[in-house]
Structures are given as C-alpha cells and as structure tokens.
Amino acid sequence: MDIFLGDEKVDSTNVTFHAVKSPTGEYSLQSCLTKEQLSRYGVDVDNYPELLPPEKNIQQDKQASQCVNLAAIPQASEEFEFYAMRLVLNIPQVALRPKDEIPVERWDDGITAFLLNYMANSSTTTYRQTGEQRSSHYVQLYPGFNIGAWRIRNATSWNQSGNSAGKWQSSYIYATRGLYRLKSRVTLGQSYTPGDFFDSMPFSGVMLGDDDNMLPSRQRDFIPVVRGIARSQARVEVRQNGYLLYSTVVSPGPFKLTDMLPSHSNGDLHVTVLESNGTTQQFTVPYSVPAIALRKGRLRYNLMAGRYRPANVDVETTPIAQATVAYGLPWNLTAFVGGQWSPHYQATTAGMGVMLGDYGALSSSITQATSEYRQQQPVKGQVWEVRYNKTLQASDTSFSVVNSQYSTADFSNLSDVLQSYRRHDYSRRDWHSNSLRHQIHVVVGQPLGQFGYLNLNWSRQSYRDAPASSSWGVRYSFNIGNLYWSLDWTQNQYRGNQDRLLSLSVSMPLGRDHDTYAAYRMTSSANSKDHELSLYGHAFDNRLSWNVRQTEHYAQFHSGENSGSLGLDWHGSYGDIGGDYYYTPTMRQCSANVSGGAVIHRHGLTLGPQINGTAALIEVPGVSGVSTSEDHRLKTDFRGYSIVPSIFPYQEHDISLETTDLPPDAEVTNTDAKVLPTEGAIVRASFSPQIGARALMTITRNNGETIPFGAMASLVNQPANAAIVDEGGKAYLTGLPETGQLLVQWGRDASQQCRVDYQLASAKKGDAGLYMLSGVCH
C-alpha cells in the first residue's frame, strides 16, 4: 500500500496491521511500522525514546522488527483508507527533521560494478588546392570500478594524426571513498587539491579532507546562484573546468538555481540549457572562490602529501605537501591557517573571516612564501587578499570581489616555482618575470524579472615590470515573445594592446510545434566581423537533432569568405552517434563521433549515455522499452535494464516509470522508487513487474456463498502476487499464466481458505486485454 506523510507520498510497501483495543472497548486496525521506517520518512525518532518500550530499546539488533507506538509523539495519528490502500501518517512538524537532513544510515553506496565512459571521433580533412588528405582519430576512455564505498577512476586516451603512429596516454588514476561519519573524503592516487586557500594543484599521493557535499544544504558554504531562461521544459547542466557540478530539469520561463553543490576552485561556470526539442543554449557565469566564513562549530580541513603532477613530462615530479584548516568561532568569526611545502618552496597563510548577516561575508588573509626557482637564489614574497560576497535580498543582486595586494616583488605560487625544474633544460633564464603588484576581480549579477538577466565582470592586474592588463565583460539576455536575445561585450587590454569583441545572437521557433529554430549571430572585433545564419531542430521524439549553419567572414585584408556546416546527432538509449560536414574556401572536413557509457553488474552488461559521476541502474526484469521520469528517451533494454546517467549524491531522488510504456502483459504495482546515493555510486532503482495476463475474476464458494470481503487471492506458491476480494467477490489479478490455481484466504483455519482453478483460454477477453473470469472455490 501507499504510505503518506501528510500529503506527501513517502513509501509503497507491504504493511502488517494488528487489532488494538481502545479504552472504550472498541477494536481498530493499527499499522506495524518500525523506528527505521519512521526515520526514513523524516521523523526525528531520536527525540522520542518512548516509541518502543524500554525493554525493546535495550535490544538494538531487534529494534527494526518492533512495532512503534505512534502515540509517543504528541498529536500524532494515522488514518487507514482501505479502498484506496493508503496509510496516512499525521505527524506534527516539530517531530520532523529538516528535509535536507538525512541520516547517514540511509545513504546507499550502490552496487559493485565496472563502469566505462567512452568517446571516439574520426575526421578526414581535404585541402582544395593540393588535394592532400589528412586523417585524425581520437579515443577517450574513462573506466572505473565501484566496490562498497570505494571508487576507482581512470582517464586514458589514444590519439593518431596523419602518418604518425597512434599513442596511448593515461591522464590520471585514483581511488577515493567517503568517510561518512567524519563528513570527509580520502583520495589515493592522482588528483587536485582544493583552491580555497592556495591555488588548486595537481598531485600524485594521498589527500584527506572534509566534504561539503555530505552536509545539509543549509550548512554548506557559499553556493553560487545561476539564472537563465528556458524556452521549454529543459535540463540545465553546470560545469566548471570541464567537470559537471549540477544537473536538473526546469520548467519553461526564468529559472534560478540555488541548490548547487559548492565549489572550492576558481573558474567560470559554463551553463548549458538542453531544451526538450533538442536545441541548446550556452552561457558563462563568472565565478571566484568565495570568502572563507563558516558557521559556528563548522570545521573545514584538507591534508595532502605526495608529488607534483605536471602536465609537461619534462618537469620534475617534486615532493610536495599541503595542510589547511578553518574553524567557525562564536560571534560569526572564522579563523583559518594553512601551509605548503616542497624542497624548493615553503608558504604559510593565516586569516580571519566574518559573516556579516544582511551585509554578506568577508575574509582577509596574508600569505608568506619562500621561493627557489631553478638555478636562482631563494626569495621571499608576501600577498594580502580580501574576499567579499553579498546578495541583496531586495533586488536579488549578487556581488563578489576578490582583491589581492602583493606587498613584495618576489611572491610566487608553488606550481610556478616547480615548473622551472625541467630535466632537459639547462639554460639559465629568469623564470620569475612580470611580478604582480595588484589584482582585483569583480562580478555582479542582476536579474531583471521579465526583462531578462544582466551579468557584469571586471578584472585588472598591475605589474612591477610590465604594463597593466584588464578585462571587462557584459552579458545581457532576455526574451521578447518567442524571440530569445543575447548580447555579449568584452574588452581585453594586455601589454598596451586592446581587443574588443561584440556578439549579438537571436533565435526564434519556426512552426507551431517548436521543433525547428532559426538563429542569427553576429560577432564583431577590431579586425574582423562574422555573420552566421543557422537552422536547427529535432525529430523522432527528440532523438534526432540536426543543424545547418552558414557563416560569412570579413577580415581587414580579405573580402568575404564563406564557410558552412551540417550536423546530425542521434541520442539513443545505448549512447549517442553523430556526424558533421564542414567546409571553407580552402578545405572541407567530414567527421563522425560516438559516445556512451556502460555498466557491468551481476545481471550483465547495460549500455547507456555517458555517466556523469553518480547514476542509477533501472531494473524492470523482463520488460523492455520502458522509460523513466528522468528522461523519456532512455528506455530499458531487451532484458529490462537502463541507466539514469546523472543524479546528485547525498540527496533523495524519486524515479518513476512511465506507465504508458508498459506492454499489456506487464503490470508494475509500485512504479516509484526512491534512491539516495553516495558520491560516485551506481544505485539500484528496482521494480517488480508481474508479467502475464490481467483478469477480473468473480469467485464464489462451492456452497454458493460469496467470498468474504477483504479475503486475499493469490497464485499458489506465489503469495506476493495477491489481490483483495471486494464485497461482490471480485478480485483484480495480474501476472497470470495461461492456466493455474488461486489460493483464497480469509483466516488461518482450514475452513477459511479454498482454491479455485482457472483457464484463460475459456475466458472472454476485453478490448483493453482484460480477461473476465468466474470460478468456484473448493
């Protein structure tokens, strides 16, 4: 039956009832729920020890099998709706945990599985003047293995171009797991340090640190806000430095994402809006690491020891170590310290942060470093940094400032110093040049309601021995009816040279179904101008997306040059495949690509789209072609399995089957599943289909009497496939074989049960595939 907490459905399961005698002597049915169930539904059971009698509370191992006394919670009650098969729990709000506070015991590490993301691309370029052809091929593999809480991940690529031989290269390999009680994570292998105290740095070694993702959202650090406009029901994906941070589905119109996971690395947020018609929007939200200001009692720490992991193989892998810690003090203050060490570099940092309530958050720090570049004497440097973040509630304006003042000329970062130590470079040169004097970065975001969204960013760097550089950026996006407009302007100044770039884009749907769009884009700089016209759209239930583009390019010393492209992509349940054709006056290029994901589990191999971190394995054994609420394009394979490629860790997700996809001979009583994965897990969303015929059977006893109301009718030897007999002796049965026998029970005595045989071949079948049967129970 379905269990509701107020108006919210929280479970669908079998429930045992027992008769309870009231003080007035009347009997009523009362459910038998366990403390574990109430905790899973959101009840703060630890505050009510009387839910179980004291002698039962002593036996912790038997606690889950005991029926709770709901009366132990003041003003709590339950209502059993028999005909609707609903149990409604009425629990006062004070007895409930905050919705985002979920017990660690409910976190699911998922199944043991091997997983693989793959991407392959092949292209051939033909040069018109010479007829020369050049081919290139690229394969990227991301294998992984999950066992318990451990996640093992690797990135390996193969690249071949022209007449050169193909080359394999491994980018990283690491093992990581969550330490859930400590709200922390340990990583062994090749990874990156966080960028909140020092610049993020690649390393090979071991790292232990706290994990913000495990905390309830209200306890996390500053979380960036992303705003935009969706033209239809769309999926929004947010990436930083190539990694997926967030993915969700939004309704048409303006959206505001405020529940993203926090990021401790600098780097703009790249937002992609995937419309339901196959079209996409892409824009960038500038982002910098926020002020370090923690709530009272909150501890943030990170410890790392290993070797520097440079991208250039000629750079030495020098031993390095790093330690940082921040703690939330009373009076909204935060204290933090940190240190970095290597044979050629030592740095310490210390600072204070403060939460200013309605006035935002502010932190200030000082960092002292001793640097020894290759073949140079050690030098000392110092930098002061101030960070400030604020969101004005009245206008929803977001404001961020990072200001760094380099009080000495010889401050360097650890990676800059270590890059100077190269195995095959024996020249003497000054690695330390263009030393910074001052640096500031400002980001302002302003939603304008029905008039769109405005984003501004400005940064400036001044040097001791070089001209200052600066960068301005403005982005304004808005809708006018069905027209979507976007205006971008940037200005960069570096070493006395100035570059301006203006971009205007507009798109509109063609036709009533909005399955085809027309777009125009103009990009203008000092020396060139581009005009681009495009058509794009979708077909076959959004599985096929296509685009046609034509560009006219004008340069300062060249007349107009035409270029164009044609692209096709198929988004299937087993992955994506596509192809492109591109031409210019001097060359033409054809390319093909394929991408997808695979999970090998105890039931076999399941293919799907690329897996983004944490995923769910859908199990509907024996039923193919069924999609879920997450993405109707992804359907179960011939064995009844599919992959939901992206869900968020440490959050509860409701996954529902699309019942319209179920074949006539399959019935799923419970079409909803709740999953609560840990990071990187592959969790099961399992459904139990009853495969076979559906029938409405009228059952009478051999003495002519009607079967008692409420009796249970089930297939012999299959008690789980059961139905309740109504007051007219009718039972709705599913998953029936062609012939069989039913067991009907309305009590424990032999006189309170009987059996009835049936044959579907002799029954009448309705238009909806429902058999009408009658039988005598002996």
Image: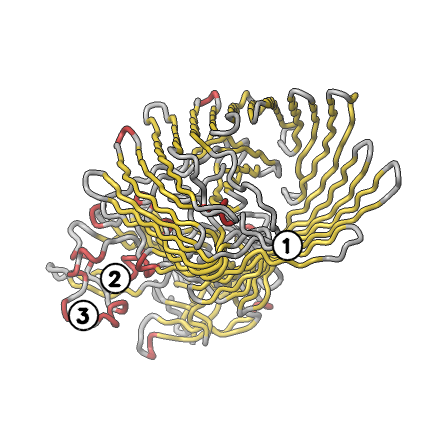
Which is nearer the N-term, disc 2 or disc 3?
2
Disc number for residue 35: 2
- For the residue carrying disc 1, how many other residues have a C-alpha within 10 Å: few (<14), some (14-19), or many (20+)? some
SS state under label 2: helix
Disc number for residue 140: 1
Locate residue 762: give its quadrant. bottom right
SS state under label 1: strand
**Which quadrant does the C terminus fall into?**
bottom left
Looking at this view, name the residue that lies furthest to the left. Answer: 23
Give how far across and how far down residue 292 sits, in percent. Answer: 33, 40
Which is nearer the N-term, disc 3 or disc 1?
3
Per the image, the residue denoted by label 3 is: 56
Report the side of 62 relative to 650 (left or right): left
**In this orientation, which residue lies closer to the viewer: 742 or 518?**
518
Spatial CA distance of label 2 from label 3 is: 11 Å
Disc number for residue 310: none
Res 766 visible? no
Spatial CA distance of label 3 from label 1 is: 56 Å
- For the residue carrying disc 3, how many other residues have a C-alpha within 10 Å: few (<14), some (14-19), or many (20+)? some
Locate residue 768: give its quadrant. bottom right
- Seen at 55% across and 24% down, the residue is 493
Locate residue 581: give its quadrant. top right
**In this orientation, which residue lies closer to the viewer: 599 or 168?**
168
Looking at this view, name the residue that lies furthest to the bottom. Answer: 750
Give, as a three-letter code, the residue at label 3.
Lys
Give, as a three-letter code, the residue at label 1.
Gln
- Seen at 84% across and 39% down, the residue is 127
